[in-house]
């Protein structure tokens, strides 16, 4: 994945102090996640269904 062509968005739930920032990017079939403090650091990506399940669990309070 060429990380220079990806549009990253910071989570609206990131901490205001700047120490808990997560960014996501929608790819063609996956969602990529990175730590905004380390934009050139490690990234992980998830297929659409597991990512949607994860978000549903967060929204439902089960995580």
Image (spheres, rainbow, N blue to C red):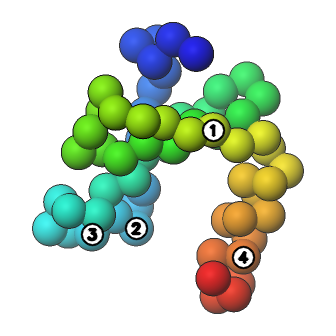
Disc on the earlier residue, 1 or 4: 1
Outermost bottom residue: 61
Quarter of the view holding residue 27: top right
Q: Residue 52's spot in the image, x, y percent?
A: 76, 57
The circle on residue 57 is 4
State the SS at label 2: loop
From the image, tell me which residue sits under label 3: 15
Residue 10 visible, this orientation: no
The quadrant where residue 9 appears: top left
Query: With respect to residue 2, does 23 lie above or below?
Result: below
Residue 45, which numbered label? 1
Q: How would you rate the neighbour count of disc 2 (Cα within 10 Å): few for under 14, some for 14-19, many for 20 or more?
A: few
The residues bearing labels 3 and 2 have C-alpha atoms spaced at a distance of: 6 Å
- Mark 1 lies on a secondary structure that is strand
Ranked by sequence position, the earlier of labels 2 and 4 is 2
Circle 2/circle 1 CB separation < 8 Å:
no
The residue drawn where x is 63% and y is 38% is: 45
Answer yes or no: do the residues labelled 3 and 1 have beta carbons within 8 Å?
Answer: no
- The answer to whether residue 50 of the structure is visible from this angle is yes
First along the sequence among labels 2 and 1: 2
Indicate the quadrant containing the C terminus: top left, top right, bottom left or bottom right: bottom right
- Please determine whether, in this image, residue 22 is positioned above or below residue 46: below
């Amino acid at each position: 994945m060429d990380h220079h062509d990806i549009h990253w968005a910071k989570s609206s739930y990131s901490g205001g102090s700047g120490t808990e920032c997560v960014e996501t990017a929608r790819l063609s079939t996956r969602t990529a996640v990175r730590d905004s403090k380390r934009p050139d650091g490690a990234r992980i990506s998830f297929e659409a269904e597991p990512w949607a399940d994860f978000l549903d669990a967060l929204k439902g309070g089960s995580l």
